[in-house]
């Protein structure tokens, strides 16, 4: 799906400072915890294979933590990277010889895999108690048609990111105050901006749409482009768009990194470039900005989660359960946070002093209070086009909102019908 790339970019190239975690440094070969077992123990070892399409250092961190704990049970976790993971699971999801036992991927793919019939409910393998400490929003992300299929590991949200050397005074507490600041500090003709955002990209406007009570699509696959709440949100966003650069991801990122914008709406994937540009970065949770209705901005969240293949749940249930219990622990969450700036799903990981001192991670935790998991139904994949055409029509072409809403609502309905 179009926006899944954001989840796949989570926590990559973002390590800041001297970090600590489980076992050896990420990026080396398999952890040494299993080496001490000797060949005889390895002969009896149960291997649990997890496919992924993410950052290999992150997966190594998880493997190191898990294998250190699981060595006493003669269980070994191995991660295998698969480009085009969706296609690979479609081919091998129920192939015991060539498929994985589990996969770790962005949650928004769940509906596709669940409808394929290749997944076991996670609660067939572990009790709900295992997920008791996981943030509710992250658990919700793995629920499809009232069945819990996924166990969350870490997540991302959009953030308000600002250049401390360029931002004047305190960051506002309301979106109306933010707009006033933008009016006073933006010169569109000169190409200098208080805030840049991809104002006609649905993912980046979702914080306003969701905060207004609108929606792009609901859990029952009903598009919401013509609901009054969505139209009100897009009308409100329009005045901000007029003061933001009209550009794509690369354009707005360059404006911020080159000092032409004091702030940007973005995510953890921007940190590497921001640090390379020498910017003294400040971060604020979008949930801390109150809309005129009193709600906080409510961005989508992408949750990296683990799913279990049916044959593995049936044939390796005990080993799979122990792996899931280990990965759900605060220890894994702390290691992911400290090594790769990932926001852990486990709420107890935030009690760690180093995690609590990480401004970006704590901002994402605050945002998790209002964030909505990106819809995990298959129909979401065809919604980005109509939603963004609607935004472009309003923000760039000046079309009437009511007229455009009906046009692109029908386009969305037609696209969903074509999926049947």
Image: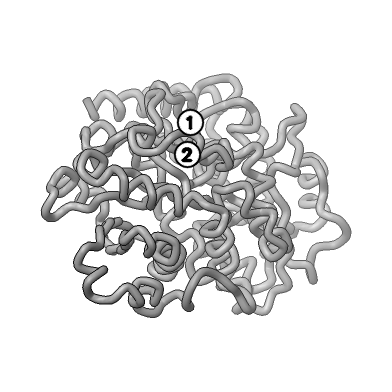
The mark that comes first in sequence, 2 or 1, is: 1
- Residue 101 lies, with reference to residue 291, above or below; the image says below
* Residue sitting farthest toward the front: 40
Q: Nearer the viewer, residue 94 or 35?
A: 35
Mark yes or no: residue 391 visible.
Answer: no
Disc number placed over residue 397 in the picture, else none: none
Residue at (67, 39) in percent of width and height: 297
**Residue of label 2:** 374
Q: Quadrant of the C terminus?
A: top left
Judged left or right of residue 289, residue 196 is left
| x and y, in percent, of residue 406 in the image | 45, 22
- Rate crowding at label 2 as few (under 14), some (14 to 19) or many (20 or more) other CA atoms within 10 Å: many
Quickly name the residue at label 1: 216
Q: Is residue 390 above or below residue 45?
A: above
For residue 358, say whether it is visible.
yes
- Which residue is at 27% across, 23% downward? 417
């Amino acid at each position: 799906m179009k926006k899944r790339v954001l989840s796949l970019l989570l926590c990559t190239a973002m390590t800041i400072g001297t970090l600590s975690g489980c076992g050896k440094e990420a990026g080396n070969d398999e952890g040494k915890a299993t080496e001490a077992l000797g060949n005889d123990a390895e002969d009896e070892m149960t291997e649990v294979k997890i496919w992924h399409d993410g950052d290999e250092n992150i997966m190594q961190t998880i493997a190191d933590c898990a294998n250190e704990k699981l060595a006493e049970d003669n269980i070994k976790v191995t991660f295998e990277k698969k480009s085009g993971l969706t296609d690979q699971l479609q081919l091998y999801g129920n192939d015991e010889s060539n498929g994985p036992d589990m996969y770790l991927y962005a949650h928004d793919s769940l509906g596709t895999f669940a409808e394929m019939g290749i997944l076991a409910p996670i609660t067939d393998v572990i009790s709900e108690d295992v997920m008791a400490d996981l943030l509710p929003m992250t658990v919700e992300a793995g629920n499809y048609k009232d069945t819990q299929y996924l166990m969350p590991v870490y997540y991302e949200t959009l953030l308000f990111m600002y250049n401390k050397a360029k931002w004047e005074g305190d960051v506002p507490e309301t979106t109306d105050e933010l707009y006033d600041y933008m009016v006073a500090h933006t010169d569109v003709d000169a190409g200098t901006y208080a805030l840049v955002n991809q104002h006609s990209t649905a993912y980046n406007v979702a914080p306003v749409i969701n905060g207004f009570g609108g929606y792009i699509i609901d859990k029952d696959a009903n598009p919401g482009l013509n609901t009054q709440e969505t139209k009100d949100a897009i009308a409100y966003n329009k005045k901000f768009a007029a003061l933001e650069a009209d550009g794509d991801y690369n354009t707005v990122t360059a404006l911020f990194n080159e000092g032409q914008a004091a702030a940007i709406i973005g995510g953890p994937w921007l940190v590497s470039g921001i640090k390379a540009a020498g910017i003294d970065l400040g971060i604020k949770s979008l949930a801390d900005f109150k809309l005129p209705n009193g709600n906080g901005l409510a961005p989508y969240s992408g949750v990296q989660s683990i799913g279990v293949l049916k044959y593995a749940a049936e044939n390796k249930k005990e080993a799979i359960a122990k792996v899931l219990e280990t990965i759900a622990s605060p220890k894994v969450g702390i290691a992911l946070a400290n090594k790769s700036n990932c926001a852990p799903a486990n709420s107890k990981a935030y009690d760690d002093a180093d995690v609590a001192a990480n401004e970006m991670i704590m901002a994402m935790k605050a945002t998790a209070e209002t964030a909505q998991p990106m819809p995990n139904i298959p129909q979401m994949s065809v919604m980005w086009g109509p939603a963004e055409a609607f935004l472009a029509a309003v923000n760039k072409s000046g079309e009437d909102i009511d007229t455009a809403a009906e046009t692109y609502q029908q386009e969305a309905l037609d696209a969903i019908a074509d999926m049947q």
